[in-house]
Image (tube, helix red, strand yellow):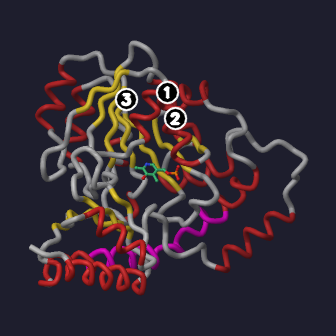
Amino acid sequence: MSANENPRNVPTVLVERMVARLRDLPFNRYPDPLANTLRDDIANAYGLERTNVLVGNGGDELLFDIALAWGGPGRTLLNFPPTFSVYAANARLTHTTVESIDRLPDFTLNEEAILERVAKGKVQCIMITSPNNPTGQCARLEFIEQLLNATDALVVVDEAYGEFAGQTVLPLLEAHQNLLILKTFSKAYALAGVRLGYVLAHASVINELIKVRQPYSVDAVSQAFGEVVFENRALFESGIEEIISERARVFEVLTCDDAFAKVEAFPSDANWILMRVPQAHEAWDYLYSQGVLVRDFSSAPLLGGCLRVTIGTPAENDRFLRELKVFLGKVTS
Ligand SMILES: *Cc1c(COP(=O)(O)O)cnc(C)c1O
């Protein structure tokens, strides 16, 4: 329960179709460099053109491509910690300057400070994670629209967990050339092991990414598997709904059950819950010793005392709650 993966594997009927696709693959040939069949599937689903879509070897590769194309010496990335650590890591690797504007104590964006900073200019790229990992909540759509109007910088909205959120910036894409939306097959679509992500943006943005990307990063096997999963994505809906309802159930227990009175759980639009726990590191150790692996953020900046638990199956969630309750019962004072 530590990496925000889908607790359920790809449905068996799709695994069978994936295996069938493997039998017909020309393994001796290079793959289509741009994965155009999958690109078209994705474009059609969003009412976009092929030129508005780019597929990558996981969202992480696309984030690196964004750093290559919009970062570099003398360029600045605006980042809003606590957030996904990959953005700052990519900036360091590309010698991009990072300017951070910390989130407020409730982990919402410091909107006023962000707008003040972009008014000064000289920013090439802005990262907004919505829902934000690891804190859980979406950014306000009205604010993102305001920001897009206030800057020429590329505004990346990382919607890796958008399927759990019931909100997307997609309606803003048509009117905003500087918006890039990042999505992945790794979370809602249970393909973390395959490595597929995609971006949606204006063709001018996609063209810049094509200049820096590795031509064959998305192999033929991943393309075929991605096509099967994307074309049948309706089969994942019930699993997504289960995660959303389990998230509500776990949150309710953590916030209303007296046994968890010492826990401060933060509301989440994603497939995990961040919580502040007394003696968090000891809590992590205890959970681990009982076979429950969560993510320990307790020594990360701005996240003191926090653990993040990925929503699992109902049985996994029950086990997590049971073991955390046992730990809390041993905490004195
Ligand atoms: C998981 C994740 C991604 C992308 O993951 P991939 O497996 O590389 O597709 C992107 N952004 C955030 C915030 C994530 O948590």
Tell me the number on the disc at residue 64: 2
Q: Is residue 69 above or below residue 221?
A: above
List x then y, in percent, for residue 104.
13, 45
Q: In the image shown, does 84 or 158 lie closer to the viewer?
A: 84
List x then y, in percent, for residue 159.
39, 51
Q: Quadrant of residue 152?
A: top left
Tell me the number on the disc at residue 154: 3
Say if disc 3 is inside 8 Å of ligand 1.
Answer: no
From the viewer's perspective, tell me whether residue 73 is left or right of residue 127.
right
Residue under the point 87% across and 44% down: 29
Q: Which circle, 3 or 1, is nearer the viewer? A: 1
- Give the SS element for disc 2: helix
Residue under the point 32% across and 45% down: 83
Say if disc 1 is inside 8 Å of ligand 1.
Answer: no
Give the Cα separation between the discs numbered 1 and 2: 9 Å
Disc 2: CA contacts within 10 A as few (<14), some (14-19) or many (>=20): many
Residue at numbered disc 1: 93
For the N terminus, which image quadrant?
Answer: bottom left
Give the Cα separation between the discs numbered 3 and 2: 14 Å
Q: Quadrant of residue 327?
A: bottom left
From the viewer's perspective, tell me whether residue 234 is left or right of residue 20.
left
Give the residue type that dot 1 points to: Leu
Give the residue type that dot 2 points to: Phe
Disc 3: CA contacts within 10 A as few (<14), some (14-19) or many (>=20): many
Pointer 1 and pointer 2: residues touching (CB < 8 Å)? Answer: yes
Q: Magenta span covers which residues?
A: 228-249
Q: Which circle, 3 or 2, is nearer the viewer? A: 2
List x then y, in percent, for residue 245.
32, 79
Q: In the image shown, does 209 or 258 lie closer to the viewer?
A: 258
Q: Earlier in the sequence, mark 1 or mark 2?
A: 2
